[in-house]
Image (tube, grey):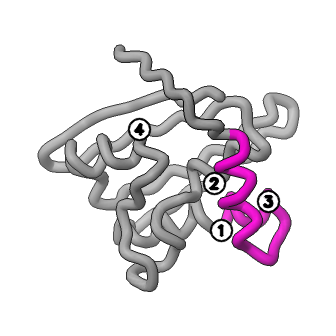
Amino acid sequence: MSIHESSVNFQNLIKDLAEIYPFDVDEVVLVELLANSLDAKPTRISIDFDRDKKSLTVTDNGKGMTAKDFEQYHDFAAGLKTRGVGIGFAGVGAKISFNIAAKVATETYSQSFQGGSNWYL
C-alpha cells in the first residue's frame, strides 16, 4: 500500500469546504455520503452507526468507481462530479468527514476495478 504525504494544510482546506454548507458538519457528512451512494444508482443502501466505536458506515451496491475515478477521489483538489450534476457537491463528502473523523476508510467494487484505502490526517 502506498503512503502519500503533502505539504498542503488539509485541516484548513477541509474546514473551508465544510463552511460552504449552511448545516452542521455531521449533517453535511451524512448527506454527502448518502448522495455519493445515490449517485452510484444502487438498489440498496445501508447505514450503520456504532456510538461505542464512534463509527459510521455507509454501504451500497451501486456501480462503484473505475481505477481512474478512485485515483482522482484521493486528490483533494479534484472532484469526481461536475457541480450541479448528480446529488452531492462535487464529491467532497469524504474530505469533509475529516472535520469530525480521525480516519476515513473507502472500498469500491466495479466491473473493472476493486480498491480500498484508509485516510488519516
Q: Does the CB distance between marks 1 and 2 fall below 8 Å?
A: no
Q: In which quadrant of the rendered image does the N terminus lie?
A: top left
The residue that disc 4 covers is 107
Depth check, mark 1 against mark 2: the one in front is 1
Amino acid type of the residue that numbered disc 1 sits on in the rendered structure: Val
Q: Earlier in the sequence, mark 1 or mark 2?
A: 1
Which quadrant, please, contains the C terminus?
top right
Nearer mark to the viewer, of 2 and 3: 3
Does residue 39 appear left or right of residue 104 in this picture?
left
Direction from residue 97 to residue 42 in the image, left or right: left
Q: Which residue is mark 2?
A: 47
Q: Which mark is residue 25?
A: 3
State yes or no: discs 4 and 1 in contact (Cβ < 8 Å): no
Query: Which of the two marks, 1 or 3, is nearer to us in this view?
Result: 3
Residue marked by disc 1? 31
The kind of residue on which mark 2 rests is: Ile
Q: Position of residue 95 (x, y in %)?
A: 58, 49
Q: Is residue 40 magenta?
A: no
